[in-house]
Every structure is written in structure tokens, then in C-alpha cells.
Amino acid sequence: MALFTKEEALNYHSSKRKGKLEVISIKPCDNQKHLSMAYSPGVAEACRAIHANKDDVYEYTNKGNLIAVVSNGTAVLGLGNIGPEAGKPVMEGKGVLFKIFSDIDVYDININATTPDEMVSFCKMLEPTFGGINLEDIKAPECFEVEERLKKEMGIPVFHDDQHGTAIISAAGIINALEISGKKIEDIKVIVSGAGAAAIACSNLYVHMGVKRENIFMFDSRGLIHAGRDNLNKFKQQYAQAEDCGSLADCMVGADMFLGLSVKGAINQDMVKTMADNAIIFACANPDPEIPYPDVKEVRPDILMGTGRSDFPNQVNNVLGFPFIFRGALDCRATTINEEMKIAAATALAALAKEPVAQEICDAYDVDSLEYGIDYIIPKPIDPRVLTWLAPAVAKAAMDTGVAKIQLDLDEYKKELEARMAASRARTKAVVDSFGYDI
């Protein structure tokens, strides 16, 4: 059942102030002295300080808490290549999530650019203003090249969430699913339906965690990716099987994991029946997964299953990742987001799923309790502890791997995060309430 009508959704975006974001001043500007400090001549003192020491831009401006969400609208989830204007509501929404989950400010930047050269050139010019760049809804294979080049050529973290968000959240699920099933990651056979940005990034992270590359069977719209096929880009070639091992149904036999990042109906109950005992299925196509949750449980109740939906257990939701990963990266002033930081986020999420869950979170999902096990291997997105578990873990990994410019006292940092979010929620609520929305 839909939670809203088309008219309600459009009214949500258009009522009162248009869109979902607003820039407000956070310093008083009520008299001549304030005005003189905010702009001329007082602003010159901040300018001189930064000119003398460029790193002081983090002290005297908002750069350290500012993310650019950059998109060209060529691969908007569920909508495809709809262009930068039509993609803007999604990017504004991303800004809302950054703010409410991690108190990070965002400018959404929707650009008329289609080539990697154009996108790379544009993003590089943003570095003086932003503390990090979240690439969003850019189609494959261009998105791979853009992110690769920007990570090499920029000194701030660049993160393509469409690639790495699903990878990190599903990796957390894998850690716990394997623990429950008693399997070792180096032994599992993984079937991947889909070969786009998310599928490649998930597979890359799984390999970094210990999955053997030869045990990953990846399918695109033409079938299994194997060495006998032509026209495979370099990203797909990494996962080409030495020979054609058959259809998706053939490869599903004995599989320990199915990862779906493709389309509704990609697999059926007969395929599911042939999987290994205590297998894992993450069917992440939205809004309809590759196979419905009830269909899997009807024939294989032992399977640990997750989807992209909130109305079934184990939601693989990117909001469990990007706000907190960027929070940790910004606060230790990391120059990049590396594999160790991603795995630290996944490990922290997996550990949090083993902790007792507050009753108000259970009530929000209309369940009596949430306890670690087959139906709860991934924390819920609204759990406020995600911030204080993930951001410090990411910051620690950045410091341990030498990509952090400043060192944090992690115990104090956790306390600061809690206080920061309480204040941010209060400010945001006051602003929203002042408009008197009835939606």
C-alpha cells in the first residue's frame, strides 16, 4: 500500500518554500558591527589568515562541514537518464539526509556534463570550497573513470555512493550472515545479477574482504561475463570467468550468495531451491526486488535475505553509510576514502546489529523486538547509534592508514557527535516548524 499519493508527493516538494533545502545565516547580523565583521572590512582578517596558511580555510569557513553532491542525472535510481534538472529533487533529498543523519551541509550541484573529462574538470575546480564530493547518479562506465581520476587528482574525499553505499551495507550483512551460517568468506560462491556501478563496487569490496575473484559469477543483460565474450569494458573484464559456465539458473546451483542489482523477476523459486544451505540473498532492485521476500521464505526459510525495502527484514539502505562515512572523513580531514575506511564502516555496522535495540526503534517498525539473527543482521537506518559507531570507526581507519590530516581523541569525539546531533536536530526542527507545514 502506498504511503502517499502523487499529489501529496508533489505538494511536499512545492508547498511554502520550493524544494527541500535552504541556506541560512548562523552568525548574527543585526547591527553595523556584525555587518562589518561578516563582510567588509572585517572579513579581510579571515582572508589574510587563510592566505598566510591555506589550511585555515577549515577554521574560518564552512569548508570542513560542506559536501558537494554532484550529478549529471544520467543514472537516477529507477528513472534512468532523466537529465540534471529532473535529477535535482533526488540531489536535494540527498542533502536532507546528510543534514538529518550527520549534520553535514550540502550544496546539490546538477551539471550539464556527459563526458568524464567535463565532469572531472568541473569537480576539480570545486576543491577550494568543499570538504568532500559525493558523486551521484552518474551512469556506468563513466562513473568509474570519473571517481578514479578525482581520487588521484584531488586532496579531499571523493565518494560515488551508487557504487560504494550498497557495497558497504551489504558487506556488513555478509559479515553477520557468514557468522550465523558458520561459513568462511574465502569459500563462498557468489552470484551477481547486474554489472553496473553498484555491482562492480560490491564485488571489489567483497574481494578485498576475502572472497575469491574466481568464485564471483557476474551476469549482465547478455548473460554470464566470461572470457569468450567481446566488448567487455575493463571493469567487467575483472570478473570474466575463464569459460562460459551456463545460464543464471545453472550457476545458482550450490551458490552461497545471490546479490541482485538488476531487475524485478531476475530469479525464481526454482533457482532459490538449488542454492547451498543457509545461503544469502540480497535482492536490491527497487522498488521491486529480483524475487519477492515471501517467495524466498516459502521455499527456503533457512536463507538469510535482505532487500532494498523497509517493509521486510534486513534493509540494504545506503543511508546507513554515506552520512556517517563522510562525517568521519571530514572530522579527521581525510584526503580520501579508502578501502580500509569502507571495511571499518561495514564492520562497525555488523557489530552494532548485535547490540540491544531500543523499544522505540522496534515500535517504529511495528515489531515487538529486534534481536541479532537471521531476520536482523543489519541495523535499522533510524537507529541514532549508527552515527557514533560508524563515524569514529571511519575516522580511526583514516588515521591508522595515514590519510587523516588531524588526529582525534575517539572517546571525546563520540561525545561531541552526540551533542552535535542533538543541537542540529533542535535547530532543524525549529526551522521546519516555523513554516507551519501540514503535510
Image: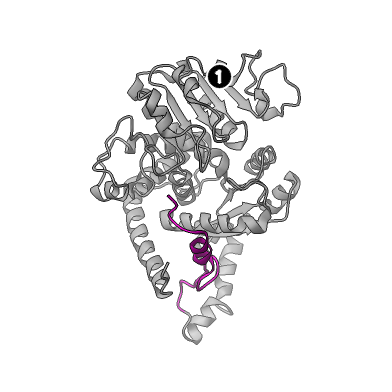
Q: How is the image coloured?
A: one colour
Q: Nearer the viewer, residue 117 or 53?
A: 117
Residue 251 visible? The answer is yes
Most extreme residue toward the bottom is: 32
Q: Nearer the viewer, residue 49 or 272?
A: 272
Q: Position of residue 372 (x, y in %)?
A: 29, 33
Q: Position of residue 168 (x, y in %)?
A: 47, 36
**Compared to 20, does 344 lie above or below?**
above
* Residue hosting label 1: 249
Indicate yes or no whether the magenta region holds residue 12: yes
- How crowded pointer 1 is (Cα within 10 Å; few <14, some 14-19, many 20+) is rated as some
Q: Position of residue 228 (x, y in %)?
A: 72, 16
Magenta-highlighted residues? 1-28
Q: Quadrant of the C terminus?
A: bottom left
Tag 1 secondary structure: helix
Main structural element of the magenta stretch: helix, strand or loop? loop
Residue 222 in which image quadrant: top right
Which residue is found at the position 34% from the left and 50% from the top?
A: 384
Tell me which amino acid carries mark 1.
Ala
